[in-house]
Image (tube, coloured by chain):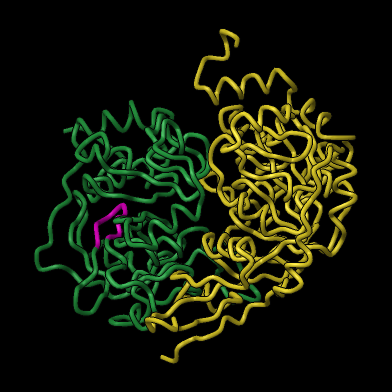
Amino acid sequence: MSTYNKMELMVCAASRELLDNTMVIIGTGVPCAAGMLAQKMHAPNLVIFFEAGGAGPMLPTMPVSVGDSRTSYRATMATTMLDVMELAQRGAVDFSFIGGAQIDCYGNINSTVVGDYRKPKVRFPGSGGANDLASLCKKTLVVTNHDKKRFVEKVDFITTPGYLQGPHSREDAGLPAGTGPYRVITDLAVMDYDPQSLRMRVISLHPNVTIDEVKVNTGFELLVSEKLAKTEPPSEKELRILREEIDPFRYVIGRGA
Amino acid sequence: MEKMLSGQGENFLPFNLTEHRKSLQNKRYENKVTTVKEAVSKYVTSGSYLATGGFGCNRIASALLHEIVRQGKKNLGFSGHTTTHDFQILVAGECFDRCDAAYIVGLEARGLSKMARKYIESGKVKTTEWSNASLAWRYKAAAMGLSFIPSKVMLGTDTFKYSAAKVVTCPFTGETYSAIPALSPDVAVIHVHKADVYGNCVIEGLNNSDTDLAKASKHVIVTTERIVDNEEIRRSPWKTAIPYWSVDAVIPVPYGSFPGNMEGEYFSDEKHLQMWLDVEQDEKSYREFVKKYILDTEDFYEYLELCGGIKRMNELRAEELMISSKKGI
């Protein structure tokens, strides 16, 4: 069995969620590595978009910015931000892939402030494109490290909508039907959302991780799927492609040591 | 839960359509080539509302931003649409005191700017929240000559609550939308690949929101990698991303996006950007850094020299083209 670090595991687990012949808008870092890996493994016709206007590039290396020249390298189109966002607004984009500082049980994300908005203890970048993507794309995936500081009962600020206050609240707020949080992939487990309560639910534990360990690192009550699975460890092929072709300089996977 | 119908954030630049139609006088077909100094001194007045083109560290008008700091412009309004290094430069001069915040204080995967964070956390800057798309739609509304655009973003979130958007109902279908108010910046600074002396601009790659921004703004200052003959524009007019009638001033500034990326020309200088982030950890070193690289430099050429000059630019060009710089280009 090959050895791997937790970042490699997260990238592999995330990439498997992206299906062939679908469209995804992604950010830099883990989401980008996951999208590239999916293309080279099981989803050669996964179309990757970036919010600055990169549409369907043949990514040569990992971009450092969602607007750098790699994001339009040998692309189908180099266009505008609104062209990409409006594609999602008219329902054509299957997945979006984002990060965040805090997440709650309904998948609401805070990337704006810690503390009071008017007197912030810490100011973060704000929405960027995250609110747009989670509002407009059908399925939103989140990749983040799993700890109590991130997985909180109540986020200080809802930057980006998950299921808001629970069942019906996305619809009541006017967000498009058929959109919402889909998966959360961490260094411990993979979560989805219970179809009735729309609360976060563990569906797969990573190798050598117990359910107690996941719960201890979560600041809210986590549901557990009746069909709790074990995450397949990264395969030799996944690791080789990831290390040699996608991230040879270890920008992403180097952070998982 | 009660439905939020109106964001409580301040609209820093309320839009008036009649005024807007008067203020956007078409710019003349005349030679607009000037200097960075003159353009900034003429069009960026303290108190005015500024927007930057490009995407944070990509195709940004660094020379104009440095000059805004050097000339000590203060109390600007600022549109934080996808802003990263551009934001960081303006923070160095504490140039703005109100900010429409969609993406600020960070440099994407590179991390957060300590000084930018500190500036916002200090309470010296009033902020109103937006998302990247909603802020882009604010430009688009003004570009279309409309006072708002309906959209499906921000609904139900605190981003909406602290924005200056409102919830509206479609008169035809009853559908709920967030109404995004138009934004017409007083001045936009945009860096492009090519422009002729009249201000017809070609962007060879990602546009982000610049075509709309140029249409929306009262004044547009363009820096360009190179000035081209008007004939070159007229040979392939479909490539014109910004036409002369939107542009007030044109300045040739080769490597003008440095240390940002310029598509097809040079990659971002990650070492320099990292140095900037590192030096921000210590107030004294940071002040010396800003003095050396911006305040004490005569112009952007001097800054480029301090950063390694043409030799460094060649390395970044090799990096952009993904070829080995050791063999020379």
Name the outermost residue toward the top: B327
Name the outermost residue toward the left: A227
Q: Position of residue A218 (x, y in %)?
A: 33, 67
Q: Position of residue A109 (x, y in %)?
A: 43, 67
Residue A237 visible in the shown view: yes
Give the residue at x 90% y 44%.
B38
Q: Position of residue A119 (x, y in %)?
A: 65, 75
* Left/right of residue A163 with respect to residue B264 in the rendered view: left
Q: Relative to residue B233, is residue A157 depicted above or below?
A: below
Q: Position of residue B200 (x, y in %)?
A: 70, 39
Give the residue at x 27% y 67%.
A215
Chain A rendered in what hue?
A: green
Residue B282 visible in the shown view: no
Displayed quadrant of residue B193: top right
* Left/right of residue A132 with respect to residue B204 in the rendered view: left
Displayed quadrant of residue B234: top right
Between A164 and B113, which is closer to the camera in this rendering?
Answer: A164
Give the residue at x 72% y 72%.
B12
Task: State the predominant SS element of the stretch in magenta.
Answer: strand
Determine if the magenta segment contains residue B277. Answer: no
Classify the position of the N terminus of chain A by image quarter: top left
Classify the position of the C terminus of chain A by image quarter: top left
Q: Which residues are magenta?
A: A183-191
Chain B rendered in what hue?
A: yellow
What number of labels is visible?
Answer: 0
Determine if the magenta segment contains residue A189. Answer: yes
Displayed quadrant of residue A167: bottom left
Between B215 and B258, which is closer to the camera in this rendering?
Answer: B215
Give the residue at x 65% y 45%.
B242
Q: Relative to residue B296, is residue B52 depicted above or below?
A: below
